[in-house]
């Protein structure tokens, strides 16, 4: 049903891919499952904070969302600690901005 969200935490990769294959939209961080959703042709919104979005080519039903802060990206593969100690690149990214990008992808 519209509005249903599925958390794939704890699922095997195969289970997660099976779940993704049935999704109308995939939203998540710069992770393997988000890129798998893209490979499966699922409309996708990928959230980028400390990692660069410009190393990826996005199709017509795929978008990257980020704040574009001057300190971001600060790492290629992600790290556990923000070098500036604040993680604003993700903490300040509000849900409405992500939802707006989701609406664009689904339009």
Image: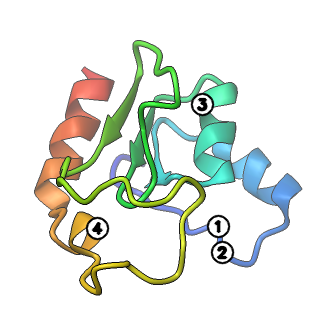
Front: mark 4 or 2: 4
Q: What residue is at 21 percent from the left and 72 percent from the top?
A: 88
From the viewer's side, name the closer residue of 102 and 57. Answer: 57
Q: What residue is at 18 percent from the left and 54 percent from the top?
A: 69
Which numbered disc covers residue 9? Answer: 2
Q: Which residue corresponds to mark 3?
A: 38
Front: mark 2 or 3: 3
Mark-to-mark CA distance, 1 and 2: 4 Å
Which of the 4 image quarters holds residue 72? Answer: bottom left
Which of the 4 image quarters holds residue 64? Answer: top left
- 106 displayed left or right of 61: left
Q: How crowded is mark 2: few (under 14 residues within 10 Å), some or many (20 or more)?
A: few
Q: Which residue corresponds to mark 4?
A: 90
Q: Residues within 10 Å of mark 1 (few under 14, many from 20)?
A: some
Mark-to-mark CA distance, 1 and 3: 16 Å
Q: Which residue corresponds to mark 1?
A: 8
Disc with the residue nearer the chain's start (1 vs 3): 1
Q: Residues within 10 Å of mark 3 (few under 14, many from 20)?
A: many
Instruction: Find out whether the residues at labels 1 and 2 contact each other: C-beta distance under 8 Å.
Output: yes
Residue 86 at x, y = what percent? 24, 83
SS label for mark 4: helix
Front: mark 4 or 1: 4
Disc with the residue nearer the chain's start (4 vs 1): 1
């Amino acid at each position: 049903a519209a509005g249903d969200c599925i958390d794939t935490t704890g699922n095997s990769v195969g289970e997660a891919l099976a779940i993704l294959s049935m999704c109308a939209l995939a939203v998540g961080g710069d992770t393997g499952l988000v890129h798998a959703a893209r490979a499966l042709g699922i409309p996708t919104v990928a959230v980028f904070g400390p990692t660069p979005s410009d190393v990826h080519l996005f199709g017509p039903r795929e978008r990257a969302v980020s704040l574009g802060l001057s300190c971001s990206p600060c790492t290629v593969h992600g790290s556990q600690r923000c070098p500036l100690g604040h993680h604003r690149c993700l903490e300040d990214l509000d849900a409405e901005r992500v939802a707006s990008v989701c609406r664009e992808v689904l339009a």
